[in-house]
């Protein structure tokens, strides 16, 4: 008898349906798993044997073949344990085979028959819903998977509970979504004294998702400013929250609840290419994908390895990254807001003659020269963060709060949402390109003349020209202006000026 159970294999954030086939035949007793399994899947036979033994179910003295179809798709992970066990139980006629036809299952088996939580329950629930199937997963994954309301989710704590559910002895209740994760307290921008130009750059970056580079001496407040950026961003839209949570589910960072707060990732400058872009064992998502729909903050930007910085160039433009391996190509989305911070030179005090080293200004050119021209060209906003005077530190907190700035940002984002409702490829101004950008950001006559002078004076590249237009469109949105005028372009150009005599805009 051929018994079948359905499960999934993960290809990036996509869960592809896999059929687990089990057949018992005469011959020497054996238990084989085929279908391109990895080591964890091959070891499932021992976990399944022990779990069935804990239920007092002995395997027959027959040849047991488990095939994971399609056989040319690599199978990785321990979540194949449960579907293998269910297919085997159906072949033994312990549970009805027809019940498995409309059920997708995943879960790791403990040796005592318990079910251990696994990664990827949320994408698996999405795949089950697309096939109009129910989902069986470990109890620790039920709250996460139940967020996909289109699929019935049942979450047994053990294989025994799953067997009783399928046989009708004790049907499981439908799992309920876990409570949304409480958002951590956000820091307020009013805590930052001075730095009004940097605060304005943060507002523009948040409104249009424009990449920002801050350069300043140590202790001037670059990290403090970046840490307050999440308080300016609007909450995730439902579709964005689901996209982001699916990536975090694959990475094992989702604790049952879905957060509406945009992610904020801050990797250390010693991180490897695989950690930033993705890869390693199982081609897991990297920091740029974990920051999807949120912020990627890279402090000490020039200290990152050159190979890491250069790998960011293509994902910034395309909004996705392909992790290529010999036997598979895994695709992850990565539309993030990049905020980078850097010292002006190795010692950090190039602008302070009393503290600067003897190599000024060569040290600054060498240090910021670690950021290649093409990478620098991808920053829409560049701002210098000067040191704050000691006298200003004794003054009471002043300036706008994060809440008031966030209100303006949310209004600007709403204008963009309305503008791009018929253009699904664009969500914010930073996504606009080609004819769409020309339609929404055509400058007035005075603005055109200003851009012509800037292009002649600074040698503005084609990419730089389009990025200036995008930033100007965002500034116009913050100004509640339907058209892009010369003052908007002038401010956008001012944020693109170089940090040194040899750095072009």
Image (tube, grey):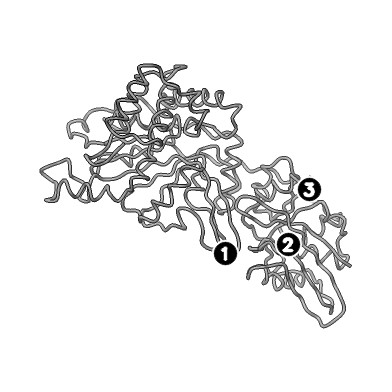
Q: Nearer the viewer, mark 2 or mark 3?
A: 3
**Earlier along the polypeptide chain: callout 2 or callout 3?**
2
Answer with left or right where residue 239 lies relative to residue 341: right
Residue 300, visible in the rendered structure: no
Residue 99, x across and y down, in percent: 85, 54
User: How far apart are labels 2 and 3 at the CA level?
Assistant: 16 Å
Answer with left or right where residue 8 lies relative to residue 23: left
Residue 31, x across and y down, in percent: 76, 75
User: Residue at horizontal 50%, vertical 55%?
Assistant: 278
Please give the label number shown on residue 326.
1
Relative depth, front residue between 215 and 137: 215
Please give the label number shown on residue 133.
3
User: Residue at horizontal 75%, vertical 53%?
Assistant: 104
The answer to whether 38 is drawn above or below residue 124 in the figure is below
Please give the label number shown on residue 139.
none
Relative depth, front residue between 405 and 174: 405
Answer with left or right where residue 352 lies relative to residue 417: left
| Residues packed near mark 3 inside 10 Å, few (<14), some (14 to 19) or many (20 plus) | many
User: How far apart are labels 1 and 2 at the CA level?
Assistant: 29 Å
Relative depth, front residue between 429 and 198: 429
| Residues packed near mark 2 inside 10 Å, few (<14), some (14 to 19) or many (20 plus) | many
**Earlier along the polypeptide chain: callout 1 or callout 2?**
2
Residue 185, x across and y down, in percent: 44, 37
Q: In what quadrant of the picture does the N terminus appear?
A: bottom right
Answer with left or right where residue 188 lies relative to residue 80: left
Q: Nearer the viewer, mark 1 or mark 2?
A: 1
Relative depth, front residue between 420 and 220: 420
How many numbered callouts? 3
Please give the label number shown on residue 82.
2
Element class at badge 2: helix
**Earlier along the polypeptide chain: callout 1 or callout 3?**
3
Element class at badge 1: loop
């Amino acid at each position: 008898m051929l018994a079948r159970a359905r499960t999934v294999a993960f290809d990036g954030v996509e869960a592809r349906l896999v059929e687990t086939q089990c057949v018992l035949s005469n011959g020497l007793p054996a238990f084989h798993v085929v279908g391109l399994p990895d080591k964890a899947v091959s070891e499932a036979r021992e976990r399944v044997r022990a779990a069935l033994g804990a239920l007092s179910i002995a395997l027959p003295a027959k040849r047991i073949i488990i095939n994971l179809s399609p056989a040319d798709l690599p199978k990785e992970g321990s979540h194949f344990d449960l579907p293998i066990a269910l297919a085997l139980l159906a072949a033994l006629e312990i549970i009805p085979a027809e019940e498995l036809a409309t059920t997708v299952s995943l879960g790791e088996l403990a040796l005592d028959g318990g079910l251990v939580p696994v990664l990827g329950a949320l994408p698996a629930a999405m795949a089950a819903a697309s096939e109009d199937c129910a989902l069986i997963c470990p109890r620790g994954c039920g709250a996460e998977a139940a967020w996909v309301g289109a699929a019935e989710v049942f979450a047994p704590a053990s294989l025994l509970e799953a067997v009783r559910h399928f046989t009708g002895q004790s049907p499981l209740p439908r799992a309920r979504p876990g409570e949304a994760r409480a958002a951590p307290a956000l820091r307020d921008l009013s805590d930052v004294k001075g730095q009004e130009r940097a605060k304005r750059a943060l507002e523009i970056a948040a409104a249009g998702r424009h990449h920002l580079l801050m350069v300043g001496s140590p202790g001037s407040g670059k990290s403090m400013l970046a840490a307050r950026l999440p308080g300016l961003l609007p909450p995730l839209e439902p579709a964005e929250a689901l996209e982001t949570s699916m990536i975090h589910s694959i990475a094992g960072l989702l604790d049952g609840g879905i957060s509406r707060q945009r992610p904020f990732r801050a990797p250390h400058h010693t991180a490897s290419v695989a950690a930033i872009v993705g890869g390693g064992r199982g081609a897991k998502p990297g920091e740029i994908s974990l920051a999807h729909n949120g912020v990627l903050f890279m402090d000490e930007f020039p200290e990152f390895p050159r190979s890491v910085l250069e790998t960011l160039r293509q994902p910034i433009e395309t909004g996705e990254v392909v992790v290529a391996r010999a036997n598979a190509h895994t695709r992850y989305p990565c539309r993030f807001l990049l905020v980078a911070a850097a010292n002006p030179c190795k010692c950090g005090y190039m602008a302070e003659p009393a503290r600067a080293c003897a190599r000024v200004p060569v040290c600054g050119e060498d240090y910021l020269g670690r950021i290649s021209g093409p990478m620098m060209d991808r920053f829409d906003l560049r701002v210098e963060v000067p040191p704050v005077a000691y006298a200003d530190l004794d003054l009471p907190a002043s300036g706008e709060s994060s809440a008031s700035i966030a209100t303006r940002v949310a209004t600007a984002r709403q204008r963009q949402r309305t503008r791009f409702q018929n253009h699904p490829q664009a969500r914010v101004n930073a996504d606009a390109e080609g004819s769409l950008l020309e339609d929404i950001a055509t400058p007035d006559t005075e603005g055109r003349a200003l851009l012509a002078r800037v292009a002649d004076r600074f040698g503005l590249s084609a990419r730089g020209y389009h990025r200036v237009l995008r930033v100007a469109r965002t500034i116009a949105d913050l100004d509640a202006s339907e058209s892009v005028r010369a003052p908007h372009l002038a401010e956008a150009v001012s944020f693109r000026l170089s940090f040194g005599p040899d750095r072009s805009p």
